[in-house]
Image (tube, helix red, strand yellow):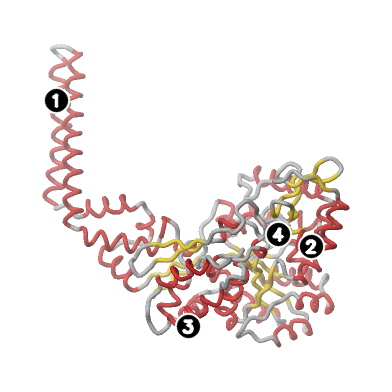
Amino acid sequence: MEFIVGYPKGPPLVRDYLAGKEQVAEFFGKSFSSLEDFRSKASEVDGRFGRAERELAAQAVLVPPGADETRLEAFVEEGGYMVTTGQQPGLLGGPLYNIYKALTAARLAGVLEERLGKPVIPLFWVASEDHDWDEANHTEIIGADNKLHRIELEKSCPEANPAIHRIQVGPAAQYQIDKFIQLLPENEFSPGYIKLILGSLRPDKTLADGFHLLLQELLGRFGIFFTDAAHPKVKAHSSQMLLEELGRSEELEAILRRTSERLSSAGYAQQVPVLEGGVNLFLEGSTGRERLYREGDGFRLRTSGVHVTLRDVREHQAEDHLVLSPNVLSRPVVESSVFPTLSYVGGPGEIAYFAQLGDYFRAHGLEMPIVYPRCSVTLVERKIRKILDKFELSLEFLQRPFHEVASEVAREGVPQEVGQAIQGFRESVAKCAEELGQAVNSIDPTLNAGATQVRSQAFSALEELERKILQAIKRENQIELNQLEKAQLHLYPDGKPAERVQNPFYFLTRYGGAFLEELYNSFEVSI
């Protein structure tokens, strides 16, 4: 199998950041390719994290199977740091890029540890407080039938939107898990992974539980540690910061708005809209997790419309730290306040929204972590490479809609003499139509329109003949076109890069644990 490694594509802001262009430097502060910038960030972290703060951070870390727990002890004793990444829970591990993020963080942590001479822990943050069930409740995988299948769980309480860590999957999930397992191949690797899958989503468990179990089992041996947005220690350590966010919401909104205006002036779109009166926090209310908005002397819950005061929120949070949680913009600040984070490994969307956060971090007395792009990988199996080589096609060619791919390939299959005859006919019609127009013009200038119409009718008939020729070639080469469609499905399912769609168990059950080893070794991190 080929591992074609690079950076994921993104909007102009992300492309300019990856290219190191000066016009984006003011929004990110530091460069992900500069060791001196990492040293500077380490110094800033040391100013906030002593031994006691690192001990508190270590208490919020989950040690997965295969990881070395003594690494955390060294982290505390020697004044270590963390490289973080994360994602909301996804059914059965979600798409491949979750694995890519974690392994990129592990590789970056290893390089930084060597360069800085102190322990650097890769930490995966599971964003279990997210409430977007429709984004988390499914996964997609190509089955043995070479078709893309979507496995999806229903929500037990469709009228509410609680945090994902609040929702048990229930007994109905077993049917969907069984469907997923039936799509996997039967070979020497499958039994172990099927056992892992079956143990990950029992009825009394949540999607977050299953996500943790799967990723920890798969990634622990690479030295990747885990935490959870709803971890009691994370919530306890960040509770005061969230209340401060609430009390300063108008000031902090203005800071974010000014940065957004600067981005717009520089020609870049903002990733996350700054909403008028919106607080960067959610409170659990009667309809689940609801965004807070300033209203009068207090706040309004967006969905239910319930009005609460700052005192109400304080009392709710004192009873249960889980009821108050950050949004997409304040979550990175929470993370950097709890953990000594040098760098955050993110995809294009995350890189884009971090550009909005420099001054916002500083308003909280922090400096933004250095944003490092996750590795993007195109996996080309041998069977797919054979198809590409047979047709002498590039990967990029297959990103186009399949009807365009099929038509282009059919055109390539048109016999040379047919193509020459068609081109000759086209040129002859154009020449004769022009001569005819000039000739009839001397009789009556209005006859020119008739000559033009004859030309159009001839070209229209020729186009119809060309269409029928291509259809005939497609029918004759249907087997080859089916092969191309298969290759496109594996590389760009649903027209998207496979890393954003395909579940990792497709590869794990075909190639075993060595797949992860090869993936890890293919990632290069240079600073």
Q: Which residue is mark 4?
A: 29
Residue at image position (30%, 65%) is: 388
Report the amino acid beneath label 4. Answer: Gly
Which residue occupies the foreground of this view, 418 or 244? 244
| Total residue callouts | 4
Residue at image position (60%, 77%) is: 216
Q: Position of residue 339 (x, y in %)?
A: 75, 71
**Mark 4 or mark 1, earlier in chain:** 4
Q: CA distance from mark 4 to mark 2?
A: 13 Å
Q: CA distance from mark 4 to mark 1?
A: 67 Å
**Dots 3, 1 in contact, CB < 8 A:** no
Identify the image quadrant of residue 101.
bottom right
Report the amino acid beneath label 1. Answer: Glu
Q: Which residue is mark 2?
A: 366
Q: CA distance from mark 3 to mark 4?
A: 46 Å
Which residue occupies the foreground of this view, 224 or 10? 224
**Mark 3 or mark 4, earlier in chain:** 4
Q: Position of residue 67 (x, y in %)?
A: 63, 84
Q: Which residue is mark 1?
A: 435
**Mark 4 or mark 2, earlier in chain:** 4
Position of 157 relative to 128 (above/below): above
Q: Which label lies toward us, 4 or 2?
A: 2
Position of 222 relative to 420 (above/below): below
Q: Which label lies toward us, 2 or 3?
A: 3
Report the amino acid beneath label 2. Answer: Leu
Q: For the view shown, which residue lies furthest in the front direction?
A: 171
**Mark 3 or mark 1, earlier in chain:** 3
**Dots 2, 3 in contact, CB < 8 A:** no
Q: Which residue is mark 3?
A: 192
Position of 62 relative to 9 (above/below): below
Report the amino acid beneath label 3. Answer: Gly
- Position of the C terminus, as image quadrant, is bottom right
